Image (cartoon, grey):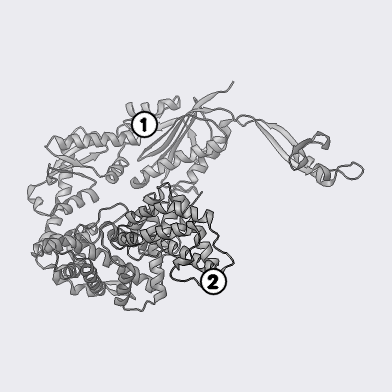
Amino acid sequence: MTQHRDLLVEIGTEELPPKALKKLMAAFASGIEDGLAKADLEFGTVRPYATPRRLAVHIETLITTQTDRLVERRGPALNAAFDDIGLPTKATEGFARSCGVAVEQLEKLETDKGTWLAFRATQPGCATKDLLTSIIEQSLAALPIPKRMRWGSSRVEFVRPVHWVVLLFGDEVVDAEILGVRTGRETRGHRFHHPAPMYLAEPAAYAPLLETEGRVMPDFAARREAIYGQVQEKAVSVGGTAVIDDALLDEVTALVEWPVALLGQFEERFLSVPQEALISTMKGNQKYFHVVDKAGKLLPYFITVCNIESRNPDQVRAGNERVIRPRLSDAAFFWEQDRKHPLFNRLEKLKSVVFEEKLGTLYDKTMRIKHLAGTIAEGAKLPLQPNAKASAEDAATLCKCDLLTHMVSEFPELQGVMGRYYAEHDDKDGQVAQAIEEHYLPRHAGDALPQNLYGQAVAIADRLDTLAGIFAIGQAPSGDKDPYGLRRAALGALRILIECRLDLHLTELIGVAAANLPCSINADVQKQLYDFMMERLRGYYHEQGIRPDIFEAVLAKDPSRPYDFDRRIHAVKAFRDLPEAERLAAANKRIVNILRTAKDAIPESVHEPLLSERAEHDLFRKITELRGEVTGRFECGNYEGAMKLLASLREPVDTFFDKVMVMVDDAALRSNRLALLKQLAELMNHVADISKLATA
């Protein structure tokens, strides 16, 4: 009868790195699951646990013994297994010996390729407890730990020193040494609330025992949810809403075992400082959650999550308020000092900051961005923005100046944000100030884009200057290495051009960026950069679920305007969904092959009197009817409408290929029919090369 038991493994450590805890928890559980599955051990629900001082996995209903397995080994072919007098060959004897049996005990295996000698046996399954140590050690060895450490005189390495290991299979301890520690059945509670060892009778008692007696919430997700609820409750008590960033919530969850949220307060005078600076120091330095009102304005409160339930919470609160006050005072001081000098005054100082040795200083880069941003804004300006070029150049001139402010030196994540504040203080145009902040957008995949033309122009210019410069000095990304973040920069520039509908030629912009550089960049390198960006575009559409053949069909026409490229993509996608699309794509492939292999010089026009078959006349008439309308829609950018018109070609095209032989002996007829196919191909492939579309 099959038996099952629960398994519990717990690794007790010193405080684990909080930003890595969630990933370590998932990897540890996944590694054990994979190991059990590879060993053919059946199991039920897997429950991972993690706190600052432990990684644990509870697996329900794990089978106690592997099932027996039929082992089958194939030996020599029967016709080569024995010699002419019927004696086994050396190969046969060696095979039998390796299987631990006599030749006479081997069986015959019939296959469609012949008969073979074979060995079959039933291999009894191993006891699960004998396999557990190896499976756990393999999972621990595979954890994503960038740098392991040693402690004491041990040669064992792990992310943090290990103090205890629990390994229970049912109510039995599996005796082993893991990470230099002997396994047992005693866990530890909270470092302060319950530091004494706690006896575990069975795996199922683990989580309840820790929570009720040990004052530890071992379930990461449950602890996270508890923190979320406590923090929001504290914010509501002062009429506000807590802003809970997922990454910060995960980090705080990884810092505490018994979470207790406390509300603290700071002086309202600090609210005169830009709230981003106050929030940055609260989140980054103190791991506090901030509170806002209904309008999203910062309130003079913060919420901290303690790892202890203090008998005197007021004293803990006062201590946190004392800690945060000097940090907020520093921010207020930086804000006051920075505003004493106009942002523009820092431009000259950028000459002392090297961007890249071969590409000059940040001042040099700023001047290049200014020139390119002006070109972009002028090319994409709207009727209501007659001064687009000058405004974009103004924003570009100031876009890096805040890097030399006290505030950004202290809080680098506020670059751009503080530039906007200082520009507004200097009475710069609101959209110019906004552009200084937004030229860093998008910072990552899925991030927001700049909202006005000036920010869009500076954002594209900044990225293209970096891309062109790094390609020019021969530092293009290779493999997984991308120290300058060029893949992210390329995708960001493409997203702005497409999603902000800036109908500009990418090749021309690359050319302008290249011409601005202090080092030469030839046409081949510019083409490499263009191809690099097209590969990013391929990934961009893949993420949207666009089929690869649709991308290839558009790429074949090499449209150099990304926004134009995007419109073609969606037009071809809509065409691909039409019932006529597959037949027309197949016909187009046939046409392309015929035209490619034709040895005749193909005329530019069709000589109508030479159209001898009715199917030829019908196809020619249909092409003539559609050409003007398709071309008109194409020229005004209505690609989807143009592609839909092509669907009406299916019947005359099918009939033509059913009734008409193109490569006839008569040279005049043959050339005329090739000319007809050439016109058909030009019409069908106006938007994309539909011969690239996949067909069944």
Task: From the image, state whether disc 2 or disc 1 is nearer to you.
Answer: 2
Q: Does residue 48 appear to the left or right of 155 in the view shown? A: left
The image quadrant that residue 553 belongs to is: bottom left
Residue identified by numbered label 1:
196
User: Disc 2 and disc 1: Cα gap in Å?
Assistant: 93 Å
| Mark 2 Cα shell of 10 Å, populated few (<14), some (14-19), many (≥20) | few
Say whether residue 432 is visible: yes
Image-based side of 79 in relation to 197, left or right: right
Front residue of 393 and 347: 393
Instruction: Say which label, 2 or 1, has the lower sequence index.
Output: 1
Residue 586 appears in the picture as rendered: no
Describe the element under mark 1 as helix, strand or loop.
Answer: loop
Q: Is residue 135 left or right of residue 397?
A: right
The residue that label 2 is drawn on is 600
The residue lying at 17 percent from left, 36 percent from top is 234
Label tally: 2
Q: Nearer the viewer, residue 604 or 86?
A: 604
198 shown above or below 91:
above
Q: Which percent across, then down, holds residue 94?
A: 80, 44
Q: Nearer the viewer, residue 505 or 522?
A: 505
Residue 130 located left or right of residue 394: right
Camera-side residue: 365 or 233?
365
